């Protein structure tokens, strides 16, 4: 009997071969040629071999899916799902079958391997799974993970607003459980849901792994390991891929991933790392961020979009899977514009963004308002807010993000959640984002090589101790040193440990590097100009890979040395002695580290007092700079102190581990444990001391932030004094120029002038004379008692609402004698501004809007003027301060009942909205004012001055109750969504008082923003 051996057939080829081999007639039989076929007995044997060493692993998250059923298929060229052989452990297998033909026998053998697939496969409690496929398999793998309301699988609710009414499931894993008839953030529950992913497995290359191994070396798949996470986004991409009915390749996977990001996020650059393969990331459950992935702005947007599906399904009382199916279908068909599901999803995501922003800010009022708006009942707000804050703290503690990074990212997150589906999708922007991520990762990895080198040095020291083991004492010293090093190294690389460490950092950065290489590869296939971007991403991956290899080698070497030490200890029967020495040595090191940390803390506290005194002494720019310098020194001292106490806590934990090991050995040998118990107590005390010190330093950090913000606020307020002079002088000149021209215009049309040149005196400004040509609208004005002149040209644009336009230039003199130039006359530019064709003219202009059709200026006397606006390009020519910028004002009026009224009539209140913007002595600022003029008295209703190039300083006051005084605040806004409050402001008799957040109150009697005419 013939025997043939071959590799396993692909599922598609196997099924075809099987059907052909078992067919009862020849493919070439003819109906008219009924030649009987003599049956044959199975006589051909065929074998297939499979080496299941290609790993596919990942997490299923919406939040986490625990105990969910897993299904694995492949997909043929027509998009049909076909069975695939896979295992849960790596290994080699073979199968042999017989049939009438070799092809049929091999097909039966392949089917036999498939039939040996796991009968049941579920995700772990954290949503993880891993399968192995044959090393010769290539093509798409289609994986689904399913939960049902009737089954045992659980879904974690990670929606801030909760996941609707229902019964949560109690799980003893530290998760939330409240039994309140609602499924709250952080609770487990049951739902109908299927997540899926299509993962493309590429043909094995000559340098690929030949045996399964745990540890990365190159990009996704290059080492026989593929990452395939399942999420809302991979499920949507899978639907697109399967629905196309075509062969699935790298290009189609990339196109589907990008399509999903564009439609469900918008700004592709935010998630640029996943634009080529969504399955490489995005598997983050916000209720329990473990630090295996970065929690950056893009990840936060993905989380909130996905979690909003849960809140939406919960509010509508529908299965989560039903809502996901609707959304995925709308993405696939490009129907989001008409999708009610997507419309409601966007509303939920926007609310979720506001909740996250409020939590990050710590503003309790904002948190309450955001949670109520999101749909959380008032009685549950405190608990939910606490649970969300705890989740944020966990993410920070595990290294996925930092408090500073969250504050930096939150603006971007909120903005994108406000505008889902819109944003930049350009390749250039994606390339920029990839390069920025590479740089951030390189920064994060700084010091990793030094840390590993330190362990390597310690290992050499241990090895040196092992060179001479002639006595029991030397063996004990060797064994103790090996135990201490092993304990320290294990704590540094344990990815399951609480808190961040080197192991988590390298794991996180490797995942990032894989994503970046994948995304950059896609860009290069589009345009070779992105090759430098791919080179940078590959360089990062190489760097991380080398660090991981170094870590793994150290791990193996340290384990080897520990085993050798333990063997020698056993020979001398000195296990208890070695355990005691390891405990004693580590306790000495922990005490030394604690003492060093205490010294660092003393330095910080001294410097903090110096810095605080400097802040209180700020009176001008020089003293402000000095205070900021002292604050910087205090910040450096604080960071050094924090680092020292973190090291002390790590050392104390090492001492505790070894003290417990000492006690265990003592119990094992029936020896007293008094010494070990004492060591345990001392270690616990050191741990508590370090934790208490870190808490205290966190409070000090908050105080240091207050002092720093106060210093910046005081420095900004000092700049404000100068700005107020500029606004007063600039507004004084420009406002007077506008009023003089308006006064003359009113005099002209009231006078009923004939055609030709005319001259006169401004009725309300008797020092000003004018000449005016009624035909050309040329107007010149001169102050007979000063060096002030204005030259203007005008025109009339007729229509249902006519416009009288003037453009001018000239010189005005402010009350202080400051000479102010008004520049750039351009009538055409003013006309474009008058009809709102441009937002801001590059000219000095004035426009009056006349409610009626007029042919000339004089005709305006028969109609109402509804509003006027003026724009002046202003430059200070001489005087104590320079300025270059613009002055803009818009004038309207209301009657005594508050209804809109024409300008220039009796018994009305004129309302002026004013903006002064420009640069003065290196300070860029924007000033907004609202003024009411009633009975020739000007009242300031609002003043908001922003220093545009100084930490986002804003001085904002207004009338709170319609009466004085003006009240408001000073804030800083360094690219954050929520401005940092610096002080409260109250108007006083001759200026303003600012009550700063550090407790200081300062009266600024030289702040006077406006000096406009009261005529």
Image: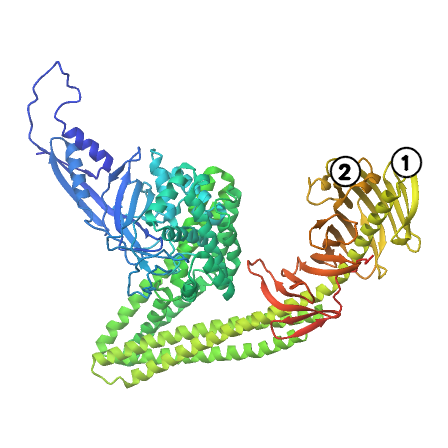
- Mark closest to the chain's N terminus, 2 or 1: 1
Residue 434 percent location from the top left of the image:
49, 49
In the rendered image, residue 77, in percent from the top left (x then y), is placed at 31, 33
Q: Judge the density around disc 1: few (<14), some (14-19), many (≥20) Cα neighbours within 10 Å.
A: few
Residue at 68% of width from left, 75% of height from top? 617
* Position above or below: 780 against 856: below
Q: Quadrant of the N terminus?
A: top left
Q: Is 512 on the left-hand or right-hand side of 819? A: left
Q: Nearer the viewer, residue 413 or 404?
A: 413
Residue 973 in picture, x, y percent from top left: 60, 60
At numbered mark 2, what does the secondary structure look like: helix, strand or loop? Answer: helix
Q: Residue at 53% across / 58% down in the picture? A: 408
Extreme top residue here? 32
For residue 589, say whether it is visible: no
* Mark 1 secondary-structure assignment: loop
Local crowd size for mark 2, using a 10 Å CA cut-off: few (<14), some (14–19), many (≥20)? some
Which residue matches tag 1? 755
The answer to whether mark 2 and mark 1 are in CB contact below 8 A is no
View extreme (front): residue: 897
Q: Quadrant of residue 247?
A: top left
Residue position marked by numbered label 2 in the rendering: 828
Judging depth in this view, the residue of 369 and 30 nearest the camera is 369
Residue in view at x 20 percent, y 46 percent: 117
Residue situated in front as seen by the camera: 577 or 242 = 242
- The x, y position of residue 751, in whole percent, is 89, 43
How far apart are the alpha carbons under marks 2 and 1? 24 Å
């Amino acid at each position: 009997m013939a025997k043939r051996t071959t590799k396993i057939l692909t599922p598609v080829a196997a099924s075809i071969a099987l059907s052909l081999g078992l067919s009862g007639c020849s493919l070439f039989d003819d109906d008219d040629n009924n030649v009987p076929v003599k049956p044959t007995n199975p006589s051909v044997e065929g074998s297939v071999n499979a080496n299941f060493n290609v790993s596919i692993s990942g997490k299923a998250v919406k939040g986490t899916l625990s105990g969910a059923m897993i299904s694995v298929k492949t997909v043929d060229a027509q998009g049909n799902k076909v069975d695939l052989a896979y295992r849960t452990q790596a290994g080699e297998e073979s199968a042999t079958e017989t049939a009438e033909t070799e092809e049929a026998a091999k097909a039966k053998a392949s089917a036999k391997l498939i039939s040996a697939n796991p009968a049941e496969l579920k995700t772990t409690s954290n949503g993880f799974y891993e399968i192995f496929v044959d090393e010769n398999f290539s093509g798409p793998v289609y994986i689904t993970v399913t939960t049902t309301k009737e089954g045992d699988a659980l879904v974690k609710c990670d929606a801030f607003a909760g996941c609707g009414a229902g019964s949560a499931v109690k799980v003893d894993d530290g998760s939330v459980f409240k039994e309140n008839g609602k499924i709250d953030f952080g609770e487990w529950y049951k739902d109908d849901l299927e997540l899926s992913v299509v993962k493309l497995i590429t043909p094995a290359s000559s340098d690929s792994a030949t045996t399964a191994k745990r540890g990365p070396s190159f990009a996704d798949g290059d080492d026989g390991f593929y990452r395939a996470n399942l999420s809302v986004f991979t499920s949507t991409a899978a639907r697109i891929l399967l629905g196309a009915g075509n062969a699935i390749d790298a290009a189609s996977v990339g196109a589907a991933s990008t399509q999903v990001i564009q439609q469900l996020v918008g700004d592709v650059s935010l998630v640029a790392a996943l634009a080529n393969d969504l399955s490489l990331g995005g598997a983050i459950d916000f209720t329990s961020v473990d630090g295996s992935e970065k929690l950056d702005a893009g990840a936060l947007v993905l989380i909130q979009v996905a979690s909003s599906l849960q809140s939406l399904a919960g509010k509508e009382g529908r299965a989560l899977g039903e809502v996901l199916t609707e959304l995925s279908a709308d993405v696939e068909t490009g129907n989001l514009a008409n999708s009610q599901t997507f419309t409601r999803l966007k509303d939920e995501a926007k609310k979720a963004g506001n909740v996250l922003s409020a939590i990050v800010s710590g503003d309790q009022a904002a948190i309450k308002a955001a949670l109520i708006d999101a749909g959380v009942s008032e009685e549950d707000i405190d608990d939910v807010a606490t649970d969300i804050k705890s989740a944020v703290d966990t993410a920070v503690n595990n290294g996925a993000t930092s408090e500073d990074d969250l504050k930096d990212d939150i603006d971007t997150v909120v903005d994108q959640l406000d505008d889902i589906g819109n944003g930049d999708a350009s390749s250039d922007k994606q390339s920029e984002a990839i390069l920025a991520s590479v740089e951030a990762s390189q920064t994060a990895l700084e010091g990793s090589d030094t840390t590993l080198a330190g362990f390597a040095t310690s290992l050499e020291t241990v090895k040196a101790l092992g060179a001479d083991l002639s006595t029991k004492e030397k063996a004990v010293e060797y064994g103790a040193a090996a135990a201490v090093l092993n304990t320290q190294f294990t704590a540094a690389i344990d990815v399951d440990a609480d808190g961040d460490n080197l192991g988590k950092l390298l794991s996180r950065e490797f995942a990032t590097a894989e994503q970046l290489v994948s995304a950059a590869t896609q860009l290069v296939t589009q345009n070779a100009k992105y090759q430098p971007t791919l080179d940078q991403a590959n360089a990062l991956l190489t760097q991380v890979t080398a660090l991981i290899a170094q870590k793994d080698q150290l791990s193996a070497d340290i384990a080897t040395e520990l085993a050798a030490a333990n063997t020698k200890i056993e020979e001398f029967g000195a296990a208890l002695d070695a355990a005691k020495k390891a405990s004693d040595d580590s306790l000495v090191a922990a005490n030394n580290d604690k003492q060093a940390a205490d010294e660092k803390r003393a330095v910080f506290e001294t410097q903090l007092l110096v810095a605080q005194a400097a802040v209180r002494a700020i009176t001008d720019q020089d003293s402000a700079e000095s205070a900021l310098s002292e604050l910087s020194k205090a910040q450096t001292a604080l960071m050094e102190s924090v680092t020292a106490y973190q090291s002390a806590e790590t050392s104390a934990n090492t001492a505790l581990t070894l003290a417990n090991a000492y006690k265990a050995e003592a119990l094992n040998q029936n020896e007293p444990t008094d010494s070990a118990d004492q060591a345990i107590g001392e270690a616990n005390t050191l741990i508590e001391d370090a934790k208490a010190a870190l808490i205290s330093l966190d409070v000090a950090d908050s105080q240091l932030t207050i002092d720093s913000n106060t210093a910046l606020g005081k420095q900004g307020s000092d700049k404000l004094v100068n700005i107020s002079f500029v606004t007063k002088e600039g507004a004084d000149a420009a406002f007077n120029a506008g009023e003089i021209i308006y006064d003359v215009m009113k005099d002209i049309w009231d006078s009923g002038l004939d055609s030709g040149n005319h001259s006169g005196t401004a009725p309300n400004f008797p020092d000003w004379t004018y000449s005016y040509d009624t035909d050309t609208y040329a107007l010149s004005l001169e102050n007979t008692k000063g060096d002030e002149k204005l030259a203007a040209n005008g025109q009339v644009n007729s229509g249902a609402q006519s416009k009288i336009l003037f453009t001018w230039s000239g010189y005005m003199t402010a009350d202080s004698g400051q000479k102010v130039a008004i520049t750039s006359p351009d009538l055409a530019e003013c006309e474009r501004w008058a009809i709102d064709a441009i937002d801001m003219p590059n000219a000095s202009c004035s426009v009056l809007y006349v409610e009626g059709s007029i042919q000339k200026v004089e005709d305006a006397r028969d109609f109402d003027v509804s509003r006027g606006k003026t724009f002046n390009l202003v430059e200070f020519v001489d005087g104590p301060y320079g300025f270059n910028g613009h002055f803009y004002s818009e004038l309207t009026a209301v009657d005594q009942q508050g209804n809109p009224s024409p300008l220039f009539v009796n018994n009305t209140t004129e309302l002026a909205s004013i903006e002064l913007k420009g640069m003065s002595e290196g300070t860029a600022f924007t000033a907004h004012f609202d003024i009411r003029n009633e009975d020739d008295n000007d009242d300031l209703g609002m003043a908001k001055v922003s220093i545009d190039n100084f930490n986002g300083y804003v001085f904002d006051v207004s009338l709170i109750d319609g009466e004085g005084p003006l009240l408001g605040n000073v804030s800083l806004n360094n690219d954050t969504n929520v401005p940092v409050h610096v002080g409260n402001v109250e108007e006083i008799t001759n200026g303003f008082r600012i009550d700063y957040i550090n407790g200081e109150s300062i009266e600024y009697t030289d702040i006077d923003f406006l000096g406009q005419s009261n005529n």
